[in-house]
Amino acid sequence: MPILSLLLISLTWFMLPDTSVNGVKIVTRQVTGGFSDTRTEYLTASRLRNEWQTHYGERAGTPMASIIQRGSNGRVFVLDLQAHEYISYETDSQGGALGDKPNPVVYSNGVLQIWINSVDTGERQQMFGHLARHIVTYEKRVATPGACTHSSESVTDGWYIDDAGMPEWRRAKKSVAVAVLVSATTNACADKTDRIEVHRTGVELGFPLKTSTTTRSQVLGMDGAPRIVASNWGSEVTEFFEGPLDPALFEVPGDFRRVDVLKNWYSPAPRHQLTGWEWFKEKVEEFFR
């Protein structure tokens, strides 16, 4: 091939527009007992894609994905990656589906008081090209008489990095709204929510790269006597990439079929670990804050 032709091809290649978008890719593995949940997030200023699949021993949940497109009206797509099917809906400014009427909040007769204190140990470690801080967070929850939740204490040992490089919507909020949905343990607590009082002290956390949490909760046994139940779980970021992302990640593939219901949407996760659906709803709300 003539040298001039090679030069023209090279110049054309270099002049092609770059269709990629800058963003962040995060792969996180969460483990609780025999359950493990791997989640992959792709984040940009106005787009979010997350993928998840929960495992329990040799049993695996359906691989799922969601895409959130933020604009004048938000758009949410939930994809069954196994069946090549998806559902979609528009959202309001708060991330709720258009036309949906939220259920009225019914409060219990008690209050859940939460004290959170985050302490910087002073230890530092390089992780994914960032200087991570070692922070231990102590949390104490006290349920007053009439509350539907239980008193508990937890300690979270974690490594955190500055989240300034994240899209603005993904950064830690200075003021955090806390809501607790209580499952019915008695008829008096059916679908009720405790009022929350949060008292926070210590350092700001940033973005967690590795955390391990131990919780001790006070619950009532079969005989009605209180007892203490301990649980442990942890999460770790296994991949953290900052740079160009393929825009196709934030679009539904052409070979996927739109349906009214995703039959395989199920995640066998324990109560204290967010299921794929709970985590997805949390991400939608976070995205539109």
Image (cartoon, rainbow, N blue to C red):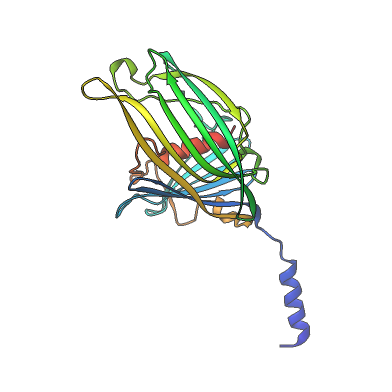
At 55% from the left and 26% from the top, the residue drawn is 177
- Left or right of 182: which side holds 100? right
Residue reaching furthest to the front: 122
At 53% from the left and 28% from the top, the residue drawn is 116
Residue reaching furthest to the bottom: 1
Asked if residue 108 can be seen in this view, the reply is: no
Residue 156 or 108: which is nearer the viewer?
A: 156
At 38% from the left and 12% from the top, the residue drawn is 145
The image shows a total of numbered marks equal to: 0
Q: Residue 82 placed where, x, y %? A: 38, 54
Say above or below: 151 vs 275: above
Residue 22 or 158: which is nearer the viewer?
A: 158
Image quarter of the C terminus: top right
Residue reaching furthest to the right: 4
Q: Residue 46 placed where, x, y %? A: 63, 43
Residue 51 or 118: which is nearer the viewer?
A: 118
